[in-house]
Image (cartoon, grey):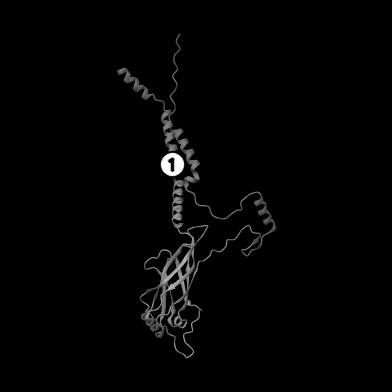
Amino acid sequence: LTRTRRARFVMTRNRPPQTRAAFVLSALTTLALVLISAPFAAADASTTGQVTGSSAAAQRRGGEEVSFVIEHSLDGVTFANTGVITGKLAVDRNDPRNFRLSAARATRTSLDAASASALNALVENDGTYRVRVPSNIISAREGSYVMASLPARCLSASNLADALTLHTDDRGNAYGVEYSTASGECDATSTDGAVAKVKAGMNFRTTVSVRVPKDAPGLNPNAPTDLRGGGPVSEKAHKASQKNKQRGGKPSTDAPKPPQTFMQKHWMKVMMAFYVFAFVCAPPPPPKKTKPKTQ
């Protein structure tokens, strides 16, 4: 039993060091691979988040009908519901997150006796008639509006024929609204000099239009004519560009490349350093014992 234990101890103590060196090398290689793949995993996660967000925004369908409330104020303090604006969504084919409101129309409620009296009071006092709509035409947020105003005498003189222009972006956010009479003019007095008044039961004749800003077209640096005001491109440069296209080369762009992390730039050097470190730290193999020759 004692000899067996001694034999086991001798075998453990004389275990070749190549096993330990291989273990250290394997651990360092695994660590290097984890460090190198971490930035790419983060980029994949951010891309997945963008795809998820775009898929959620892509739930809007072209031709879907949406509506939002329009409110007015007859005393300059309180606002009341005065109708609904409806329209259909036109979704961008290239980016389903972008859309605009088309075929917008307003359905206004007729004036009752109290509303007509309050509007006539505004006309006599040369007051201001105000309207407002939600700051987002798709998902209205409470307390967030865009507002416009018009002299009440102008609205009364136009027989309640008004025009509302809504300025939005391609995500449904309203950042401005224009409000005027349908003709754009304000003739507040009649031929006999009296100020026009409204009557109970009259209806607003509101015309609605929605405007979305457009991006300016980008300049083509390879165009034969310099659109930036520098004059025509030289014939030599144009021929060089045409040869590059015929050879299948891509035109050079000045767009900056995204910044790279330290591991993305120097991963090869880090790997070489790990391998050199593993081999340097590994102990030398034991000398081979030569058996004495027996005669």
Query: Of all residues shown, which one is farthest toward the bottom?
Result: 192
Residue that label 1 marks: 34
Three-letter amino acid code at the position of disc 1: Val
Rendered residue at 66%/50% (across/down) = 246
For mark 1, give the secondary structure: helix
Tell how many labels. Answer: 1
Q: Residues within 10 Å of mark 1 (few under 14, many from 20)?
A: few
Quadrant into which the C terminus falls? top left
Single out the residue that lies furthest toward the left: 1
Q: Quadrant of the N terminus?
A: top left
Q: Is residue 104 left or right of residue 113?
A: right
The answer to whether 290 is drawn above or below residue 164 in the figure is above
* Image x and y of residue 269, in percent: 49, 41
Q: Residue furthest front?
A: 201
Query: How far from the left and from the top, in percent, is residue 31?
Result: 43, 39
Residue 29 position (above or below residue 113):
above
Q: Is residue 65 above or below residue 294?
A: below
Residue 234 screen position, x and y as percent:
68, 59
The residue at the point 34 percent across, 22 percent down is 8
- Above or below residue 291? Residue 107 is below
Task: Choose between 254 and 279: the one closer to the eye.
Answer: 254
Q: Quadrant of residue 150?
A: bottom left
Residue 43 percent location from the top left of the image = 46, 49
